[in-house]
Amino acid sequence: MRAIAAGGERPGGPCPDLRGSQPTGSGNAFVQYNSTTDRLDFNVRLRYAFAEGTDLWLVYNEGLDTDPVRDLGGIRSPTSLARTVLLKYTHTLGL
């Protein structure tokens, strides 16, 4: 923890002014199909920025085998090959 002087400065320089910062959110998605392996992969990311340099991410990844006849010899629904849910917090240190 760093000490902050009465004038709003910390050792090594002034504190960043975050009074004008507004929390923001964003998101994106990526989908990819590989016809050679009949695999469908998708990735969804949601980002919430509390302040400059401080973010919270929620990430979802899924890989599906879409070959309708592989291993069972008949029609079937896509099978999940891999699934990940990740919550990530990042904070930039002002050194």
Image: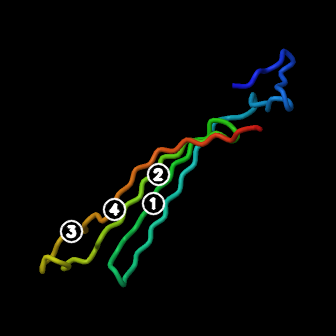
In the image: residue 88, left or right of residue 72 = right
Q: Residues within 10 Å of mark 2 (few under 14, many from 20)?
A: some
Where disc 1 sits, the SS reads: strand
Report helix, strand or loop for mark 3. loop
Please give the residue where the numbered disc 3 appears in the rendered image: 77
Q: Amino acid at mark 4?
A: Ala
Question: In the rendered image, which residue does mark 2 sit on?
Answer: 59
Residue at 51%, 44% in the rendered image: 88
Give the position of the C terminus as an image quadrant.
top right
Looking at the image, what colour scheme do you see? rainbow
Q: Which mark is residue 73?
A: none
Q: Residue at x 79, y 21 (%)?
A: 4
Please state which amino acid type lies under the numbered disc 1: Asn
Q: Quick check: 58 left or right of 21?
A: left
Q: Are marks 2 and 1 in contact (CB under 8 Å)?
A: yes
Q: Nearer the viewer, mark 4 or mark 3?
A: 4
- Residue position marked by numbered label 4 in the rendering: 82
Q: Earlier in the sequence, mark 2 or mark 1?
A: 1
| Of 76 and 5, the residue lying toward us | 5
Instruction: Quadrant for residue 23, please give it.
Output: top right
The numbered dot on residue 43 is 1
Q: Alpha-carbon distance for marks 2 and 3?
A: 24 Å
Q: Is residue 38 above or below residue 77?
A: below
92 vs 38: above or below: above
Amino acid type for the residue under numbered disc 2: Val
Q: For numbered disc 2, what is the local secondary structure?
A: strand
Disc on the earlier residue, 2 or 3: 2
Where the N terminus falls, by quadrant? top right
Tags 3 and 1 touching, CB below 8 Å? no
* Residue 43 image-quadrant placement: bottom left
> Farthest residue toward the bottom?
36
Residue 60 horizontal/vertical position (percent): 42, 54
